Image (cartoon, rainbow, N blue to C red):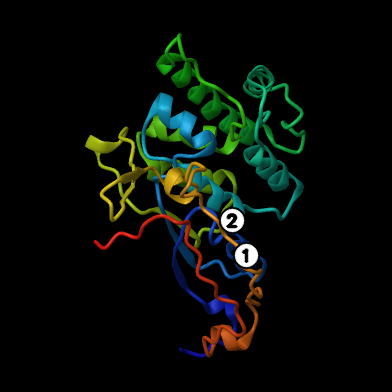
Amino acid sequence: MASFSNLQDLSLLVFSGGTAFNSVAEELSKQNITKVAHVLPVSDDGGSTAEVLRVLGGPAVGDIRSRCLRLSDESDEEAKAVKELLAHRLHPTDSAQAKSEWYQIIEGNHPLWDPMISQPYADTIRSFLVHFHSEVLRASPTSNPFDYVNGSIGNFFFAGARSFFHSIEASIFLYSRVSRIPTDSLVLPCITENHAMQDDRITIAAELRDGSIIRGQNQISHPTPDAKAFRKTAEAATGLKLTDEKFWEKFQLGSLTSVEFWGGLERSSR
């Protein structure tokens, strides 16, 4: 591997899930290593993303939002306030409280609208949140309305932008500018939309050896508890020190504890 006299000269391409690389992404930012292209899935169907998909459809933005959040600027008070707003989640269990808080946010009188956020920033963010809200009201069936429980404001902003532009790439561009992600850092969806699929939901599935199918990223990653329950009992592995010369120049990972874990699901032979 080439020798780097300055870590800032690194240029990286990363394929990862929504959380697998987040801690490393934050550490890279701290080391001012910003020339990184992050390629992420658009099949997340858990958490608040699941409710957005149920009502609005479209490629999932949860994993992309999670990575963008880690790359967001925190160099001044305004940037920190914007990040706090987009990182916020509504009440985790009470639908009425979550909905009440959401209305405070879109009406502009929630404490998260920190005075440090300038009016142009606030107007830009709020306009796409309001657009998301109008799309949800239009699309939600009266018999089963949108549930704001544990809703991610960042997800709602992303979904509003994607719905407005009919493009996940445009929504990433907007989020990147609003949260001041370094211009040489790229966040890319693993699948590029075209006009025909712009509102399609993208789902992954796993076929087991017995022929049964597990559908959805959330069910694959976190299967419903049953006889095939997922268990992970690995000891904590030694963390990587990104400034270690052995890692970047010699590509030696040092001492790591490697433990295979498998949730009891039958492995596919295909």
Question: Marks 2 and 1, how far apart in space?
Answer: 7 Å
Q: Is residue 106 left or right of residue 65?
A: right
* Residue found farthest to the top: 142
- Give the position of the C terminus as an image quadrant: bottom left
Give, as a three-letter code, the residue at label 1.
Ser
Residue 7's x, y, as percent?
Answer: 59, 79
Does 132 appear above or below 248?
A: above
Viewer-nearest residue: 230 or 205: 230
Q: Is residue 136 left or right of residue 206?
A: right
Asked if residue 160 shows in the view, the reply is no
Does 134 appear above or below 180?
A: above
Viewer-nearest residue: 201 or 174: 201
Give, as a three-letter code, the residue at label 2.
Leu
**Mark identifier at residue 29:** 1
Q: Is residue 203 left or right of residue 144?
A: left
Name which residue lies at 40% across and 51% down. Answer: 41
Secondary structure of the residue carrying tag 2 is: helix
* Residue found farthest to the front: 227
CB atoms of marks 2 and 1 within 8 Å: yes
Name which residue lies at 58% across and 63% down. Answer: 25
Residue 95's x, y, as percent?
Answer: 63, 20
Does 30 appear above or below 58?
A: below
- Give the residue number, with chain letter if any, for mark 2: 71
Does 10 appear above or below 265?
A: below
Q: Residues within 10 Å of mark 1 (few under 14, many from 20)?
A: some
Residue 209's x, y, as percent?
Answer: 28, 56
Name which residue lies at 72% across and 31% down. Answer: 113
Residue 84's x, y, as percent?
Answer: 70, 42
